[in-house]
Image (cartoon, grey):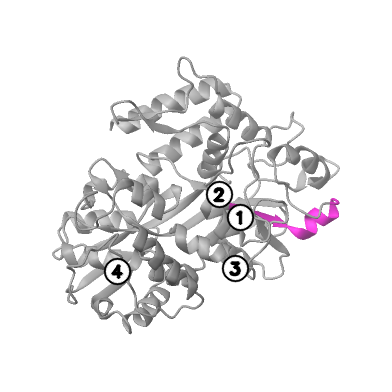
Amino acid sequence: MRSLSIFQITLLAVFGSLAVVGVVVFALFVGSGGGNIVGPVTIWGPFDATTFKNVIAQASESESRLTQVTYVQKDAATYEAEITNALASGDGPDIFILRQDYALRDSGKIMSTPYSGPTGISQSQFENTFVEAANPYLSYAGILGLPFLTDPLVLYWNRDLLSSGGYSQPPRYWDQLGDMVQKLTRRNDAGTILKATIPFGSFANVDNAKDILSVLILQAGGDITREDKTGRLVPALSARTGDTSQAAESAVRFYTEFADPSKANYSWNGSFPHSQATFAAGDLAFYVGFASEKSAIAKTNPNLNFDVAPMPQIRGADRATTVAHVYAFALTRTSGNPQGALTIASLLSATDLSQALSEAFAIPSARRDVLSAYQSQSNVAGGLAGTGLCEGQNVSICSATFSRAWADPDPDKTNDIFRDMINGVTSGSIAPTEAVQRADKELGQTIGQ
């Protein structure tokens, strides 16, 4: 491993452009017996085909094995169903792009890579190579995907609205929001909110609501799922006997206060359009969204004066935390060319191409070495936090370094569980403690299924 580190340092010294000079297959992944011929490999994914193909074409000038790659873009709305149906009929791709929260649910579609075998990578090496949010790809059977991109949750803020309230920077800590709500929320004479501060409280019209709640729970020291002593996945929302933390209950109380007219933090309700659209329209001071949403917001309203900051944290916490979507190349069980698929997945997730794909899609890499290389540069592009955390750094790249994720048994079902938990509290039909206990039970049933 020592010689590998020296080699990586050498690569970092020549970073700086999309041109991939001599794509390298690390011994960490592929080994020395791969050869030059891999055979045709087809990849399916929701990412833009033109951008993806341009990266592959440029890299293939130095790495001939990439000339046999075919990338097919799929509609994100139907992607999961199309993958399932294609693999069931034996007509699917060799590789498909997988998001970490679908790793557990889709594990039956994947040919996992053993911790000792063609990749030559152990669990600890995986954890040292990729961001912590990639850990859901680690299973008892092996590695479910080779990560290449990390899309962290960040805080978007409207410079003009903050300036009107006397603020030059967004909050660094959640406890700063109280005063901001009082100064930034604008109401008419009837009390109707015209300009909102932050879209917390409701669920249906809050984009990324489940992810926001996940951040709040994790920051408070809680878990959503965890492994028990036998390695079995179990729910962890509700406090168990002996636990001193009520993280989920605290997170739910905090979140729902912003939609409660009787609370001082009241700043949002179900009458607003979706939160991203409200922010893009200039009617919202803060929006919590993924780093990849920045271009869509700017395209919707080119005149919007906004920037990006790290997610606010709990004051005094031992570590900074946000959540992220991590994308990986997963090998399908039905591939007719599994060795070729493994070689291509390893190439695409290695340092050079992970960096090239990151730059092309404007989403941070999932590799720690690529992120470190960017952080060491003094002239990184992007908004500055100006609040201490990530000061002087590209916020998205910095946020990727402290991103986390939890093992999600079924993203669609858990979204419904979180929705019902929040709606029960905001409707007044159930207290936060009982709502969390009910959600914990439903989460356990989902894991069992």
Q: Nearer the viewer, mark 1 or mark 3?
A: 3
Viewer-proximal residue, 165 or 193? 165
- Residues drawn in magenta: 154-166
Q: Is residue 335 left or right of residue 368?
A: left
The mark total stands at: 4
The residues bearing labels 4 and 1 have C-alpha atoms spaced at a distance of 40 Å
* Residue displayed at 57% across by 37% down: 219
Cα separation between marks 1 and 3: 31 Å
Helix, strand or loop at disc 3? loop
Which of discs 3 and 2 lies nearer the camera? The answer is 3
Regarding mark 2 in the picture, which secondary structure is present there? loop
> At 49% from the left edge and 32% from the top edge, which residue is drawn?
420
Left or right of 149? Residue 82 is left
Give, as a three-letter code, the residue at label 3: Gln
Nearer the observer: mark 4 or 1; the answer is 4
Q: Which residue is mark 3?
A: 377
Q: Amino acid at mark 1?
A: Gln
